[in-house]
Image (tube, coloured by chain):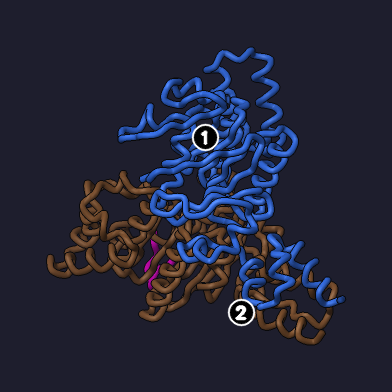
Chain colours: A brown, B blue
């Protein structure tokens, strides 16, 4: 479980990047943290693996105060994929990259081999396994960073902009993988601007703006609220924008649509009436 | 990485370059401003001609005045101690007069909304802010062609929308040719006149945006077709499909017209 209790943080005195954040996340929850550029999203998630410690307030991971433990100890529980994959890739080969954390955490060799193979496969990277990570494309490097963290199968997964530079097929695979982590009781914490992806995979959306928690609820509750979204510089999914504009003209059209399937049903019904 | 690509980009056009992850989009972008063949090792055959210049016969710094490239990862192109100096860096290196540099910097700070961060160092900026600065710094060279490699990947949706509106304006008013690599097709589709689709280094589709988006093989390789286009495709309604709206507004308009018939 993750618990933020009245957390404040500033890099330089007097400039609060996080202000009074309190939130609780339970095992098996998939949460997206969304908000404008510079809102404090990355700063917030860096508190979960202890890279940053609160200036005021407390962060508990499974009941342990992050101030009383080390980032190394937290790394067993918390996997972190950075926004910029280049900040974490360093090995000579893709295989070496994925094996690194497993080896550090003392996994047996046959287990390491099995996971390296499995996770390279899941991210469509098997054909490059003996290459240097730096010969990969931007999207492939991002997937390698994901593979090298997910292979540890941590209790808490933090993914900073995981869909960056990914096409529709890769996003679908990632969505399925996140589902399987949810199924095994992990917490998945996404930092993302990708509203369409969030609608597809998350149970809960946290909206942050200028360091403050603005909203906490289901995607349907939050993505239909234009005022809230505008404050966090988000746009509703295209389908929701369409539903709102149609409902403004045709009051019988459902407003709270967020998926393509719902839109197809509602629009077919509308057109069939004629 | 690229396999027998033959393409021409019309002057003053707005072209979207799309395709699955790893298909060769970035490689193609690097060919446009001469980073390939001058900087990256590898083997290139064939020719790239930019406004009558063959890229293999002109140095990268010459080509930089014709073709501005905004990198996928903004950190790889930010070098100066603060935002203002970053924007001035390119023109300073090309010996542009001081007054003119000052004008360009001020114009760009205005139009790209950088006022609040003008004195900050690149490492103090969020990912999205860095991306806006990288675009400003490239525009400061006043290139004829602007190539952008996923310029909105770190931006919040409203900032992404604003960046694309800015590109649209530069294309319309300044006749700047825009070649845009972007996965968020819902943002690109209403603006781009043409799309080029790459898969495994080959061009598999090109043409007017509407036609390319309706082409089944484009969806099959993993190009994220905008939700409004998917909606129209699934509705099984010939008149709406023929209209093929590319934006929310045009979809709303087309659906209302059908309802009111």
Place of residue B182 in the rendered image (x, y in percent of width and height, measured from the top left): 54, 50
Res B249 → quadrant: bottom right
The answer to whether dots 2 and 1 both sit on one chain is: no
**For numbered disc 2, what is the local secondary structure?**
helix
Name the residue tied to disc 2: A261
Residue A9 in sight from this viewpoint: no
Q: Closest to the observer: B139 or B242?
A: B242
Place of residue A50 in the rendered image (x, y in percent of width and height, measured from the top left): 39, 57
Tell me what residue is drawn at x 63 percent, y 26 percent: B142
Tell me what residue is drawn at x 38 percent, y 45 percent: B3
Boundaries of the magenta span? A59-67
**For numbered disc 1, what is the local secondary structure?**
strand
The numbered mark 2 sits on a residue in which chain?
Answer: A
CA gap between label 2 and label 1 equals: 39 Å
Res B76 → quadrant: top left
Name the residue tied to disc 1: B69
Mark 1 Cα-neighbour bin, 10 Å: few <14, some 14–19, many ≥20: many
């Amino acid at each position: 479980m993750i618990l933020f209790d009245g957390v404040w943080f500033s890099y330089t005195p007097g400039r609060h990047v996080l202000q009074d954040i309190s939130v609780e996340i339970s095992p098996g929850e998939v949460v997206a943290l969304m908000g404008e550029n510079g809102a404090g999203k990355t700063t917030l998630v860096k508190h979960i693996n202890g890279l940053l410690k609160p200036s005021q307030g407390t962060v508990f991971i499974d009941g342990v105060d992050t101030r009383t433990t080390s980032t190394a100890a937290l790394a067993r529980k918390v996997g972190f994929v950075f926004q910029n994959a280049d900040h974490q890739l360093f090995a000579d080969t893709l295989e070496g990259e994925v094996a690194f954390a497993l080896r550090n955490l003392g996994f047996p060799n046959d287990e390491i081999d099995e996971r390296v193979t499995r996770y390279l496969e899941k991210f469509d990277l098997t054909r490059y396994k003996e290459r240097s990570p730096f010969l990969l494309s931007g999207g492939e490097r991002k997937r390698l960073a994901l593979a090298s963290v997910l292979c540890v199968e941590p209790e808490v997964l933090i993914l900073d902009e995981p869909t960056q530079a990914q096409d529709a097929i890769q996003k679908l695979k990632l969505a399925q993988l996140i589902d399987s982590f949810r199924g095994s009781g992990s917490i998945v914490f996404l930092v993302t601007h990708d509203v369409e992806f969030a609608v597809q995979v998350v149970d809960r959306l946290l909206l942050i703006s200028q360091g403050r928690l603005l909203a906490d609820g289901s995607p349907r509750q939050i993505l239909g609220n234009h005022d809230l979204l505008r404050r966090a510089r988000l746009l509703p999914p295209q389908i929701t924008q369409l539903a709102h504009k149609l409902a403004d003209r045709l009051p019988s059209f459902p407003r709270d649509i967020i998926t393509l399937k719902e839109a197809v049903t509602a629009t077919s019904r509308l057109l069939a009436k004629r | 990485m690229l396999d027998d690509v033959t393409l021409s980009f019309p002057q003053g056009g707005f072209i979207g370059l799309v395709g699955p992850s790893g298909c060769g989009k970035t490689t193609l972008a690097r060919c446009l401003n001469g980073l390939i063949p001058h900087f990256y090792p590898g083997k290139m055959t064939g020719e790239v001609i930019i406004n009558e210049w063959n890229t293999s016969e002109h140095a990268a710094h010459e080509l930089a005045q014709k073709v501005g490239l905004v990198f996928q990862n903004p950190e790889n192109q930010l070098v100066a101690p603060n935002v203002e100096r970053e924007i001035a860096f390119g023109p300073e290196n090309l010996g542009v007069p001081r007054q003119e540099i000052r004008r360009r910097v001020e114009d760009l700070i205005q139009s790209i909304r950088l006022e609040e961060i003008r004195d900050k160092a690149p490492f103090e900026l969020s990912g999205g802010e860095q991306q806006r600065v990288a675009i400003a710094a490239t525009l400061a060279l006043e290139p004829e062609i602007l190539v952008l490699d996923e310029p909105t990947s770190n931006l919040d949706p409203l900032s992404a929308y604003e960046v694309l509106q800015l590109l649209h304006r530069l294309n319309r008013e300044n006749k700047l040719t825009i070649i845009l690599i972007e996965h968020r097709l819902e943002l690109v589709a209403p603006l781009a006149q043409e799309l080029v689709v790459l898969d495994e280094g080959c061009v598999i589709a090109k043409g007017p945006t509407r036609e390319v988006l309706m082409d089944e093989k484009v969806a099959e390789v993993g190009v994220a077709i905008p939700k409004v286009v998917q909606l129209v495709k699934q509705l099984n309604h010939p008149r709406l499909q023929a209209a093929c709206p590319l934006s929310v507004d045009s979809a709303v308009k087309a659906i209302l017209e059908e309802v009111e018939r």
